[in-house]
Image: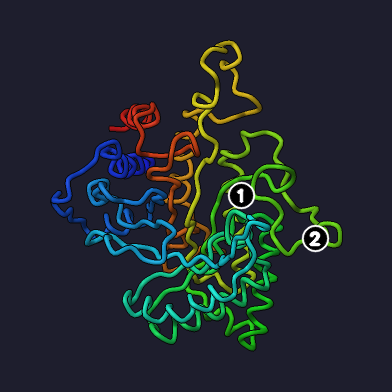
Amino acid sequence: MEKPKKYYLKLIIISLTIFTNIRMSSDAATLQYTPEQYDTLIRFGITAPLGIEGYDLESIHALTFLDWAKENPNVPDGIEYIHVLKMRFVKVTEDDESGSLDEAAYQKFLIDLPSLVARNPGAVWLIGNEPDRRAVQDDLTPEKYAQRFFEVATTIKNIDPNAKIGFGSIVQPTPIRIRYLERSLTELSNLTGSKESALALIDIWSIHAFILNEVGTWGADIPPGFDCVVDSCDDAILITDFSDTYSIDIFIERIQNFRDWMKLLGEKEKPLWITEYGSLFYYWEVYCPDEDEEYCQNPYNGWPTERDTINFMIETFDFLLYATNMNSGYSVDNNKLVQRWYWYSLNDHLYSFGGTLLTKQPFFCNFKSEISIFL
């Protein structure tokens, strides 16, 4: 009897996670994959906020990762490293602890860029990391992001025509952030001379796919360059129920909408990568004080439990691996909507963000129990 597709998905998830609670030796045997296995496993990326030292990524069947650095000299053989070029260069002073744009530091980066690219031929370069996020990430107006993208992308392409360049990396594909990208593309078109030449600089559409509030005191905030007093911010997302942050329905709708937008832009035939996503709330079990057992029985306002995060990851893997659309999907990839996705995270601190794979907390044990029924 033919097994359902979810059966194979669970086997893939087992391969990705079965060793994630173990530190591996550096001389672990190199694993070999058939072309079909490799094509599937390369789609499942991981993010490593604390680096990969001490972890044999091949032993957890992870074939690609990023750590938000320009380069990493210690990438194991057979593992694809994704270079992230942050576009925020700031000078922090006693009077301005948040920092102001440091043009001199950016110019030095441009001077050093050719040698960086030459050392890494044929690499993937994501230009910018959440340029639409104020203060804590790149924090650039759409126009400033376009200007820096243009300078960096043209430099990379001049040095290495085989390099692949990712554009965007917005926090989440919401309406107001799609407007951010549209403004960036308008400016990029002005810089290159046409929309066509602007789009020609983009090899990969890169987005993050968190589900976060955009109004108020927490979440992704309104993108820089948007003045809600002057401009309309009516399309900014307001989340009042925390369960929305791990809603598979919202996740699917946003990815489908973004692919539809790519088609309208004439970018249907380019890959879409989700270069960071997950459930960022640390688990209710971690947050809730042990001494208040009655209160802890009912998570506040949909606050995610460990089980919620596990379910969200499995549901998103299922969608990302199998979702296709003849009208908006990438035709050379059997019309799949998404070509790669990078789970957050491999090893961030459990008390900072949820969804970390390498932990002795119940997440790992419960995850194995969840998938064992499919063996």
As drawn, is 261 to the left or to the right of 160? right
Residue at 29 percent of width and 64 percent of height: 73
Viewer-closest of 287 and 163: 287
Mark 1: few, some, or many residues within 10 Å (few <14, many ≥20)? few
Name the quadrant of the N terminus.
top left
Query: What residue does disc 2 label?
Result: 227
Q: Which mark is residue 42?
A: none
> Hey, which quadrant is residue 95 in on the image?
bottom right
Q: Which numbered dot is residue 253?
A: 1
Label 1, secondary structure: give it.
Answer: helix
Which percent across, then down, holds residue 133? 63, 56
Farthest residue, direction front: 94
- Residue with the most extreme right position: 230
Front position among marks 1 and 2: 2
Give the x, y percent position of residue 109.
48, 75
The disc labelled 2 sits on which kind of residue?
Answer: Asp
Mark 2: secondary structure: loop
Q: Locate the C terminus by quadrant.
A: top left
| Observer-nearest of 338 and 72 | 72
